[in-house]
Amino acid sequence: MAHGVRYLFGMKIILDSKGFAAFRGLRALLAGTALSAAAAALGWQQAALAASDNEAAAETPSQSSSASAASAVRDEALGDYLAGLHASRSNDLASAADFMLVALEQDPDNDRLLQDAFSLVAAEGRHVESVRLAKRILAKDEDHGGALLVLLIDAVDRNELDSAEGYLNAMAEGGINRILRPMLEAWLQLAREEVDAALASIKTLEENDGFEVLHTLHSALIHDVAGRDPVATRAAYDAALEAAPQPALRMVWIVGNFLERQGDGEAARALYDSYLAENDGSGVFEPALLRLANGTKPQPVAESYVQGIAETLFNLSGLLTQERAERMALLQVQLALRLDPKFVVARILHGEILEDQGRSLEAIAAYRQIDPASPFTWTARLRIAEQLDELGRTDEAAAELEALAEDWPDHYEPLYRLGNLLRGQERFAEAAEAYDRAFERLGETQQRHWTLHYLRGIALERSDQWDRAEADFLRALELEPEQPYVMNYLAYSWVEQKRNLDEAKKMLARAVELRPTDGFIVDSLGWVYYRLNDFEKAVTHLEKAVELRPQDPVINDHLGDAYWKVGRYQEARFQWRRALSLEPEADLIPVIEAKIEKGLQAESERI
């Protein structure tokens, strides 16, 4: 078995590594003390929002601050407060909000409880409660950023422009509000038909490094919603595309929508085709391609300042999500959905954030709210299958993927995902069959399909179909010649079979150049030197591999073998004992035990 496969392949259909992810400026605003400032500007109290280990450090309170907060809570409310704190740390925000509200009823003058309860209900999208608590907070703290934002969005939802502008003017200008304020201001100005002022406000985003895409996109949307000259509007959209040479799906969707409405189907099709050439088809663009074939036109993506503000909140939520500030992102996307409950990509982003928080059941519920007639139902159903598998409901997940494959007979991705699911369950023969069905739908594979060859190769190798597996690995390398994980798997397999050793050495040396800190690949290079009887070099590389992956039993076992070959017998037995303590696979245990007792003997040397 080829070891060391830790390659995770996936695709965020709404938020990928392109487009909005290029906003490197957000990191500057959220890094270190700036993240604390951003959180403070939003008015978030961190005791009740104790983050999980993968959250940004500024969202994780110290134990002392939690203890201090608890000591300030009256005895009759303390139990509910502590229960809320525990639920929050477990990312059960719905229960945390309920507990905090009960605690607040028992201790209504406690500012800490008021702000904690507010933050939780706002993050959960409980708008009536969050508005009520926001008003109570502002009566005590007129600068509270989170309360101001919630009330601003409430005013926008009610089309009360004067109130919305008043809340905006009261918001602080630091932290993330350096981005949020000018965007909100621009759309509120558009609501008063002050188009030039709106464009001037949005242009101030250029003062913050890395936000050119955000500036150009919203500038184009303002032109579009305002009904400005189509030539000027198209120039604005062209500027947005130029700012994002590898645009994310959302950008392509918005610009393509405009091009279709302007009757330039050729440009729209070229834009869609360009995106699909680099990203595996998700079914999302099929309605657009059908419209182009039929000569029909879509409704605009945004038709009002309200939808423009919802887009703003969606964009900010996506950026915060990519910076692992999920709790702050959750507030933004919930407010976007308040303004536009049919904002389907925001609904998907909401599900993504819930996934990132480990809230699979809630993510599934979010995805199930998407209209089955929406082109994004494809995305939602793929995500549902992933989360069912995450919950251990593998058969349900497989059934969802099979149903999706039946509903979309021209698309390979459900079967590709099914193969991944079965491979993850170590049902390798079944996985290989699912991949085979995916290939039947693909026909001739292209460069972006190297992963499909690679992953089917793993399933085939693990189900003892080596000839087919080798062909897949070689084809993957034809499509992606410098892919270190494919080189590692193929070359290590050759080493295990004691063949093509010189070619394997060259391949692994290159893989190590590309991934010098990957312990599994470094181990593979060490092991090929062992097979070539160059034991000194084997020791050098295997020692490095153990430094990189000290808890892997196979790597420790390899180092033990190499030590024995260079006469370092005591150290060899130490490494074998360590390998044994790291719970190796069952078939390896008696082999290691024999080596500990007798050392390496030529007639019994493993592998």
Image (spheres, grey):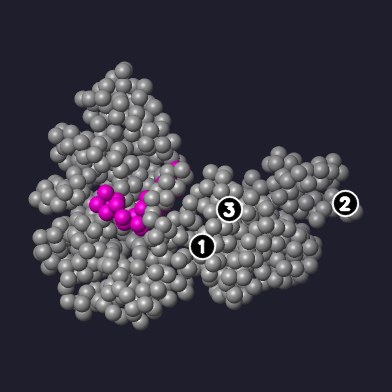
- The image shows residue 369 at horizontal and vertical percentages of 38, 50
Q: Nearer the viewer, mark 2 or mark 1?
A: 1
Label 1, secondary structure: give it: helix
Q: Between disc 2 and disc 3, whose residue precedes?
A: 3
Answer whether labels 1 and 3 touch (C-beta < 8 Å): no
Secondary structure predominantly adopted by residues drawn in magenta: helix
The magenta stretch spans residue 351: yes
Label 1 – label 3 distance at C-alpha:
14 Å
- Magenta stretch: give its range: 336-359
- The image shows residue 91 at horizontal and vertical percentages of 42, 38
Q: Which residue is mark 1?
A: 407
Residue 604 bears which disc, if any? 2
- The image shows residue 444 at horizontal and vertical percentages of 59, 76
| Residue 184 placement, left or right of 467 | left
Amino acid at pointer 2: Ser
Tally of numbered tags: 3
Amino acid at pointer 3: Ala
Quadrant (top left/top right/bottom left/bottom right) for the C terminus: bottom right
Label 3, secondary structure: give it: helix
Residue 198 appears in view: yes
- The image shows residue 19 at horizontal and vertical percentages of 37, 65
Residue 398 bears which disc, if any? 3
Amino acid at pointer 1: Asp
Q: Nearer the viewer, mark 2 or mark 3?
A: 3
Label 2, secondary structure: give it: loop
Front-lying residue, 568 or 392: 392
